[in-house]
Image (cartoon, rainbow, N blue to C red):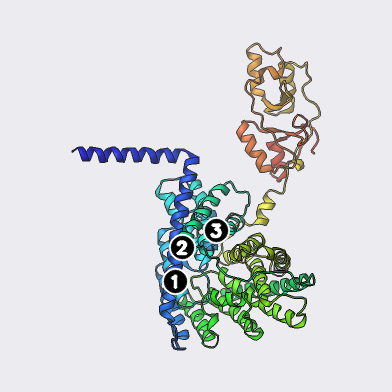
Amino acid sequence: MAAADSNAGKRTALERWLEGVRQSENNLALALSLVIGALVGLVVVAFILLTGRLAARMYPAGGAAWLRIVVPTLGSLVTGYLLYRYFPYARGSGIPQTKFALYVEDGRIRMRTVVGKFACCSASLASGISLGREGPSVQVGAGLASVIGRRLGLSKERVKWLVPVGSSAALAAAFNTPIAAVLFSLEEIMGDLHAPVLGSVVLSSATAWMVLHLVLGDDPLFHVAGYHLVHPLEFGVYAVLGVVGGLGSVCFVKLLLGLRERFRRLPRWTVWFQPVIGGLTVGLMGWFYPNVLGVGYNYVERVLNGDVVLRVVAVLAVLKIVATAVCYASGNAGGIFGPSLFIGAMIGGAVGSVAHALLPGYTAEPGAYALVGMGAAFAGIVRTPLTSVIMIFEVTRDYTIIVPLMISNLIAYFISYKLQPEPIYEALAHQDGVQLPNAASRAEAARIQVAQAMRTVPEVFPPAATVAEAAARARQSGLDAWPVADADGAWAMLGTSEMEGAIAGGLGGQEPADILGDPVFLHVHPDHPLGLALERMGASGHKAVPVVSRADVRELLGVLTLDDILKTYGVRKPDDQWGERG
């Protein structure tokens, strides 16, 4: 009986603690970031180990060449049926699906999808499908965070807040790049480098990274020789590499999108069988060039360390572009992160080989160009230039490569943007009929600023004005509030109803500032977006907000009203009942 009472007491204490955590936003953010980071880190480590060990069994050392055709074909057949029958949302890379969950499904990712993504991707990648593990890891991490949030009974907004937290933890463990994981989650998943979840994203990423190192050790993804600039002429070669990397990126993206559109036009009943086309394609290529199978990180490291044969790396770059595009377009489960790095390394190795053959005394070994090529291809394909620079630095831990990397990345990004304006993840979502917000749409929403809608104030209440006089002036304006300065010169909105109440209470002879009471000093600046002005109108309870100078908040520049905002968007016809438009 005593034991039962003790257990009940413990449960009650635990329930109280959990309730306290739920009610404290800071405690909640801290606790969930740590829990999600640790859990996602362990799951991703298991994903890496399982994939590697399955691949070792399917392709034993000295195995027959026919395995390179049969294994990926059968693997894609099995996973294709599972994806069609049980896990329809586990196809593809996982990045568009994660963004869809964030913006359309209020952060909801089902546990069934998480399990399906883990299982199908493990089988696909182990069988040699030419896709990567990083994108799927992001969806798995985001899904686990979503499940945890919903099981704790959190609100939809809180669940959505957890999605980039799980994404960052997953990428940090999958790529061994905690800083790049944070940047990618904010730059690509959230689309906002200043998102308020930054602290939680950083914490979960660091936690997952520590879990990875505790289990698998402190090794970078690639071991590379030290880089040094041989001659300033090399910067020109890196610019050429940026051009080639950008063109290669565009070819890959256009091929993938074009093939995927063709597969989507096939009869619905063929969906379960379509992944076999990708498996058979990569298998036939693997018969002649085994390094095209799987992600190919082992061969990438060889190229980075100077083991480069021009003809081989050039052929592998082309084959990898085709193999990855067909595998992804046909509906296999896997991402494009890893293949992007492979393609970039082969392109960089080819450019470096040519440059070193022509200018041996002025250029570094081809491995240095392969390293920069990885970042250039990633920037051109995934279209996250900041993440790509930091990611290559983290996977190699070589800071001296940063400047050439920035040159090539910028050029590759510019070429990719000009020749393929729509980024790959947005294009994939559009093919599925989903319109996800992007950087351009967010910028457009914030483009109209207060300065374009505000009205200058022809006059303010003079210092000697009474509440009765102010109320009469306010009635003529037809507004529900008027700007009033307090004793310190700070501006607040005084409502006409407050003035009428003061007059009814016998305070009509006082100055307007005397009846402000406890004012809410909510203002906007001319360069603020209209959305912020609406938020501050809602917080103040008035349909107008003062516009003040950034140089001196006591300088009143004008007033913005709800009607002005509606007129700016064409909802109401303009009128001149109060001052001139700014």
Instruction: Kindly tell me whether residue 294 is visible in this rendering.
Output: yes
Disc 2 target residue: 44
Is residue 83 in view from this perspective?
Answer: no
Which part of the image, by quadrant, shows the C terminus?
top right
Give the residue type at disc 1.
Answer: Thr
Name the image quarter holding residue 9.
top left
Compare marks 2 and 3 and give the one earlier in the sequence: 2
> Which comes before the other along the chain, label 2 or label 1?
2
Type of amino acid under label 3? Lys
Disc assigned to residue 99: 3
User: Residue 73 appears at what percent x and percent y?
Assistant: 45, 82
Is residue 220 shown left or right of residue 71? Answer: right
Q: Disc 3 on helix, strand or loop?
A: helix
Q: CA distance from mark 1 to mark 3?
A: 25 Å
Q: Nearer the viewer, residue 446 or 200?
A: 200
Residue at image x 42%, y 69%?
50
Q: Residues within 10 Å of mark 2 (few under 14, many from 20)?
A: many
Q: CA distance from mark 2 to mark 1?
A: 10 Å
Q: Quadrant of residue 426?
A: bottom right
Mark number, residue 51: 1
Answer with mark 1 or mark 3, whichever residue precedes in sequence: 1
Quarter of the N terminus within the rendering: top left
